[in-house]
Image (cartoon, rainbow, N blue to C red):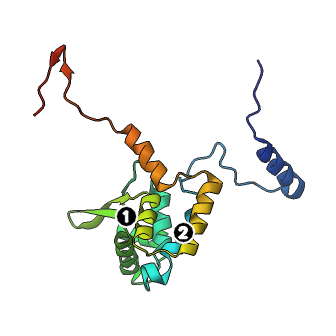
Amino acid sequence: MLLLDRKTKASKRREKIRKEFWASEDPWTGENEKGWFRAPRTLPLLLGLIGSKELSGKYDPTRVYLELLARHIDGGVIEMSTDEDHSYSAGYQSNRSVRSWQERMKVLEKIGLIKTKQIGNQAYKYVFLVHPTSVIKRLHDENKISQRWWDTYRARQMETGEAPFEERMKMMAKKVISLVPGRVKGKHRAAR
């Protein structure tokens, strides 16, 4: 049986570099591992943007956002633990840690990166992560992003192959099935 080598030329080159300079080190590859989370390659730019005073004021929410991304499994929905667990994981350890975390959650919601749902006494029972491309496009349209940042972001999107907002919308439109009145078991159904 012939095994196919699925490594790209660039991947083979990086492996050669690693073996040459760090042969005895344990590499962070992600292969056959669990416990990883999905994130866009533009994440560092996004974190820099949401950490800016122009967008977030005096409450930098980057650690809180990163902690939420790390808890996200799929579907954009995070089933939250306790505020204490989340605040500690985001690096807040003082006697006002929960309050600091909650202030930053409000900033993320104000920016539009998250939507939240209160259930009972738990203010943040469910958190929905809004796709960053949609949020960035809206912030750009509202002139809340500098042209320099926008150009850098767009260049990075092209470099990594990340779909821009318009392309994402086209792909999503193709997935939507229009509900047109049609046949039901051989009969025509009237539109209401």
In the image, residue 7 sits, relative to residue 125, either above or below, namely: above
Q: Earlier in the sequence, mark 1 or mark 2?
A: 1
Residue positioned 26% across, 66% down in the render:
122
Residue 73 in sight here: no
Hey, which quadrant is residue 182 in on the image? top left
Considering every residue shown, the one lying at the far bottom of the view is 58
Q: Position of residue 155 (x, y in %)?
A: 62, 62
Mark 1, residue position = 114
Mark 2, residue position = 150
Residue positioned 75% across, 28% down in the render:
4
* Three-letter amino acid code at the position of disc 1: Ile
Q: Nearer the viewer, residue 144 or 82?
A: 144
Considering every residue shown, the one lying at the far top of the view is 186
Q: Position of residue 53 (x, y in %)?
A: 47, 83
**Is disc 1 surrounded by few (<14), some (14 to 19) or many (20+) residues within 10 Å?**
many
Q: Position of residue 157 (x, y in %)?
A: 59, 57
Hey, which quadrant is residue 105 in on the image? bottom left
In the image, residue 124 sits, relative to residue 32, either above or below, namely: below
Q: Secondary structure at mark 2?
A: helix
Q: Secondary structure at mark 1?
A: strand
Q: Position of residue 70 (x, y in %)?
A: 50, 59
* Three-letter amino acid code at the position of disc 2: Trp
**Is disc 2 surrounded by few (<14), some (14 to 19) or many (20+) residues within 10 Å?**
some
Residue positioned 43% across, 84% down in the render:
57
- Quadrant for the C terminus in the image: top left
